[in-house]
């Protein structure tokens, strides 16, 4: 079957020209003139085009790698048409042009059932998009920058449209070797960049070890400016592939890199403090474990024979005891005690798989105790060398013993297995155990001796593994990978789960669940009773507008809009509406722009403002902010003029000019790598009744007269301006993937998507049972995504929805059948 048989060459060429023209048109209007991200994007796009010309299948790597991180909305202000859309337009243009020009056999195919499911989903999607966007609204300044706009339907609907446009390219390029060669590294590259971004955000804002702060990371996902779970959904989709890479590694360096990536990704996952994500990761691990047990012996990538139940139970019991003791150790001896216990367990795990010379055990023990006593006498009270950090006695000697153990086990001529080297390793292990007890006592005194002693006792029990027949584990690649992953998991999970904020989050689970159920009941109450709305949905992307106008609590969420002067159409300004809540003040909606502010510098803010409604307040400040949760703010002392007594109605609705000098204080300081970004914030607040403040001609000038604000006159509407709702997220999200589908696409959309998920899931599980590790990772990823979707919408973030749809399409692909052998023609 040729690729152009499903899509005629002329149609492919026409679609390629349309996509190329749309890409050029988007770049013509795209705001690229403020900040370094625009320059980066301007370099990336032509480089990507040249890469597609050189290796057309490289889009399988670039799209999953760039989907999560190519997000410049906080700089550009554009979130209806995003950078990834421009990249996908270029992908479609190059890919379809080649489809129409090259007679290339298809790499994969779709079954009849898969085609039927995709057709039903596409019809439901089309109906939901039309119901959301019709009747067409005027294409004014608020059409493409406001969630209340009917064109929000196109923003949400583009994810499915992109997946269908990329489907012919998948059928051409996405055979199993290409997915292993391109798509898997692309997923891993995206996960690595997101994890590094999360690590930077934690270091720049609350601090890496500050787990008591209620700061929750957003990483590069600008869609979280109104809440949601974009980061949670992405990590649920991508983390299983880090485990897949670790399971498939064939060299030490690849295994080390895989463990490093797993550590970074798990750190990002745990520091989201998302209970839904924790549950999703647990579900994915259980699925992988269950499928591994169900895999028949003799299948590819599966060892011959099943794992004995007794051996499995002993492993689980040992792991459970170790986890419990690590938790006990952490509660009394803190991070240092936990790390020391993990190192001792790791040393025991490695030593227990070696043929230890037990006849040398008494001599090794005596030698170790003597050396430990002599060295400990150097630091009798642990305060030598001025007590500086790890140079304290117990820490220094523990590191010395660990280094001695590593040298004894380092592969050499004897491969680290000679009696002399193993005897030295036993000496080092004994010193590790002694210093572990010393660390516990140094940190918490006598109460820590009991958990430290229990840890040493379990480590000694692990050393007897070599004397069990057959042993519980061996030093093969699989055992080392599992042990390394488990160690990383425990080192991250135990401190995070014991932190103040995580404890508070879990303590309020029942209360938060009641609030979520109440919100879901309100969502259903807002759905019209008309049969067509129940069957086909209210329209894709319609929920924010529906909540704004029809929420049962009669709340008026804050809003931001751009308007033009009635008598002067060329004069555009921004209108900030404060929230109105019957129960009190609501969440402010903050207009944001990133600025290159210098510390301890005198700046001058100037603006024109006018107001309507009951005494609104205009809040203006500079804050350290990534996306949500502003920190270390400098308030600009701006006070709107009071209404003069006896003024006629409407007299105070004229523009008034303000100029306020202020000092930037600490903002903009710090090292360039960990310097938190600084953003200007504008927000309208007031009483329980909504009121409006209008702002124009906004300017922020440095002492030399340099203008820092881009588009301060708002002539380009939302260009370079973004916004955020830091805490109150219910007006923007349904907070349930299933309910989101049911309300916005109706029963038709929900059932068709359910059919697609069921078909893809069954095929993945069938392949996983036959030993296909990639299918198992994909199934675990989709399961985790759905578990996160129990409590968040997810599909209202186009880039996350697109990644999910592409994963579903890859799950539905089947290899092309070989053509039957032609019978030889008669002579």
Image (cartoon, grey):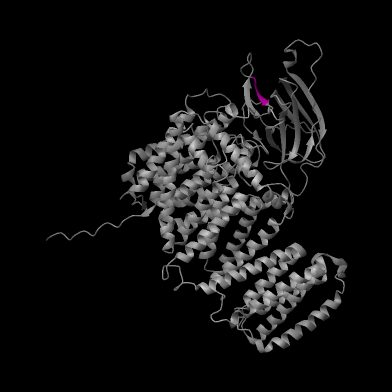
Q: Where is residue 815? Give x, y as percent.
A: 36, 56
Q: Please identify the quarter of the rendering in which residue 593 is found.
A: top right
In magenta, the rendered stretch is: 571-576
Looking at the rendered structure, the number of numbered marks drawn on it comes to 0
> Which of 79/241 is in front?
241
Q: Say if 522 sits above or below 266 in the image.
A: above
Q: Residue at the spot x=67%, y=79% of the render?
A: 408
Q: Is residue 673 visible?
A: no
Write down the quadrant of residue 664 in the picture.
Answer: top right
Image height of 378 relative to 44, above or below:
below
Q: Is residue 618 magenta?
A: no
Q: Is residue 624 above or below residue 716?
A: below
Pinpoint residue 591: horizontal percent, then vertical percent: 68, 32
Viewer-side residue, 629 vs 783: 783
The percent coordinates of residue 17 (x first, y second) are 41, 36
Residue 747 sits in quarter: top left
Residue 386 visible in the displayed image: yes
Kindly identify the residue that appears in the image at 41 percent across and 71 percent down: 298
Please state, as top left, top right, bottom left or bottom right, where the C terminus lies in the image: bottom left
On screen, 601 above or below 202?
A: above
Residue 624: x %, y % from top left = 74, 41
Magenta segment main secondary structure: strand
Q: Residue furthest bottom?
A: 359
Looking at the picture, tell me which residue is in the foreground, 314 or 351.
314
Q: Residue at x 56, y 79 (%)?
A: 471
Seen as rendered, the residue at the extreme left is 827
């Amino acid at each position: 079957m040729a690729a152009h048989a499903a899509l005629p060459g002329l149609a492919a060429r026409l679609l390629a020209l349309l996509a190329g023209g749309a890409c050029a048109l988007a770049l013509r209007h795209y705001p690229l003139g403020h900040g370094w991200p625009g320059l980066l994007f301007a370099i990336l796009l032509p480089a990507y085009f040249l890469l597609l010309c050189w290796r057309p299948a490289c889009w399988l790597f670039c799209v999953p790698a760039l989907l999560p991180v190519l997000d410049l909305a906080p700089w550009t202000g554009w979130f209806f048409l995003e950078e990834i859309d421009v990249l996908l337009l270029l992908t479609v243009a190059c890919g379809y042009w080649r489809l129409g020009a090259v007679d290339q056999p298809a790499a994969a195919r779709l079954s009849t059932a898969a085609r039927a499911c995709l057709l039903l989903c596409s019809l439901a999607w089309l109906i939901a998009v039309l119901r959301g966007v019709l009747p067409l609204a005027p294409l004014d300044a608020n059409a493409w920058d406001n969630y209340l706009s009917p064109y929000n339907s196109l923003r949400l609907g583009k994810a499915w449209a992109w997946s269908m446009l990329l489907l012919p390219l998948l059928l051409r390029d996405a055979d199993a070797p290409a997915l292993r060669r391109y798509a898997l590294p692309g997923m891993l590259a995206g996960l690595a960049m997101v994890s590094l971004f999360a690590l930077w955000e934690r270091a720049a804002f609350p601090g890496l070890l500050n787990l008591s702060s209620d700061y929750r990371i957003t990483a590069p996902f600008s869609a979280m400016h109104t809440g949601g779970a974009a980061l949670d959904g992405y990590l649920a989709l991508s983390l299983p592939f880090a485990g897949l890479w670790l399971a498939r590694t064939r060299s030490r360096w690849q295994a080390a890199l895989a463990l490093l990536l797993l550590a970074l990704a798990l750190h990002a996952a745990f520091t989201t403090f998302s209970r839904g994500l924790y549950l999703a990761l647990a579900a994915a691990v259980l699925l992988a474990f269950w499928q591994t047990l169900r895999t028949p012996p003799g299948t590819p990538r599966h060892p011959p024979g099943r794992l004995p139940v007794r051996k499995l139970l002993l492993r689980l019991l040992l792991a459970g005891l170790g986890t419990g003791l690590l938790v006990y150790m952490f509660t009394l001896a803190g991070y240092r005690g936990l790390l020391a216990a993990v190192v001792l367990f790791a040393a025991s795990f490695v030593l227990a798989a070696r043929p230890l010379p037990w006849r040398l055990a008494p001599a090794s023990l005596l030698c170790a105790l003597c050396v430990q006593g002599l060295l400990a006498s150097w630091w009798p009270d642990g305060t030598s060398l001025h007590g500086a950090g790890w140079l304290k006695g117990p820490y220094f000697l523990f590191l010395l013993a660990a280094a001695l153990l590593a040298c004894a086990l380092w592969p050499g001529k004897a491969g680290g297995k000679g009696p002399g080297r193993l005897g030295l390793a036993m000496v080092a292990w004994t010193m590790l155990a002694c210093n572990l007890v010393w660390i516990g006592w140094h940190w918490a005194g006598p109460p820590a001796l009991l958990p430290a002693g229990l840890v040493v006792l379990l480590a000694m029990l692990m050393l007897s593994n070599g004397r069990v027949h057959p042993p519980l584990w061996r030093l093969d690649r699989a055992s080392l990978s599992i042990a390394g992953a488990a160690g990383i998991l425990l080192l991250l999970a135990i401190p995070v789960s014991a932190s103040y904020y995580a404890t508070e989050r879990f303590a309020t689970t029942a209360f938060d669940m009641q609030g979520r159920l109440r919100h879901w009941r309100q969502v259903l109450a807002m759905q019209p009773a008309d049969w067509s709305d129940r069957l086909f949905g209210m329209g894709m992307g319609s929920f924010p507008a529906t909540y704004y106008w029809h929420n049962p609590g009669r709340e008026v969420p804050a809003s931001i809009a751009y308007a033009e002067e009635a008598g002067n159409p060329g004069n555009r300004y921004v209108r900030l509406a404060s929230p109105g809540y019957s129960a009190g003040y609501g969440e402010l909606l903050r207009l944001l722009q990133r600025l290159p502010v210098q510390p301890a510098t005198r700046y001058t803010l100037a603006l024109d403002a006018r107001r309507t409604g009951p005494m609104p307040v205009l809040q203006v400040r500079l804050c350290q902010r990534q996306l949500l949760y502003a920190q270390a703010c400098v308030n600009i002392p701006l006070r709107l003029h009071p209404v003069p007594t006896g003024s006629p109605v409407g007299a105070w609705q004229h523009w008034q000019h303000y100029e306020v000098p202020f000092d930037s204080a600490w903002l903009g300081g710090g090292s360039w790598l960990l310097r938190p970004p600084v953003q200007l914030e504008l927000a309208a607040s007031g009483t329980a009744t909504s009121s409006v403040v209008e702002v124009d001609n906004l300017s922020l000038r440095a002492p030399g007269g340099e203008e820092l604000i881009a588009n301060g006159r708002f002539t380009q509407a939302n260009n370079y301006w973004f916004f955020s709702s830091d805490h109150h997220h219910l007006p923007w999200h349904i907070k349930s993937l299933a309910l989101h589908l049911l309300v916005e696409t109706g029963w038709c959309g929900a059932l068709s998507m359910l059919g697609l998920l069921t078909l893809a899931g069954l095929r993945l599980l069938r392949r996983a049972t036959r030993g296909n590790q990639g299918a198992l990772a994909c199934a675990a990823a989709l399961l985790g995504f759905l578990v996160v979707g129990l409590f968040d919408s997810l599909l209202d973030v186009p880039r996350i929805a697109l990644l999910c749809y592409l994963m579903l399409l890859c799950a539905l692909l089947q290899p092309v059948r070989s053509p039957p052998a032609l019978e030889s023609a008669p002579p």
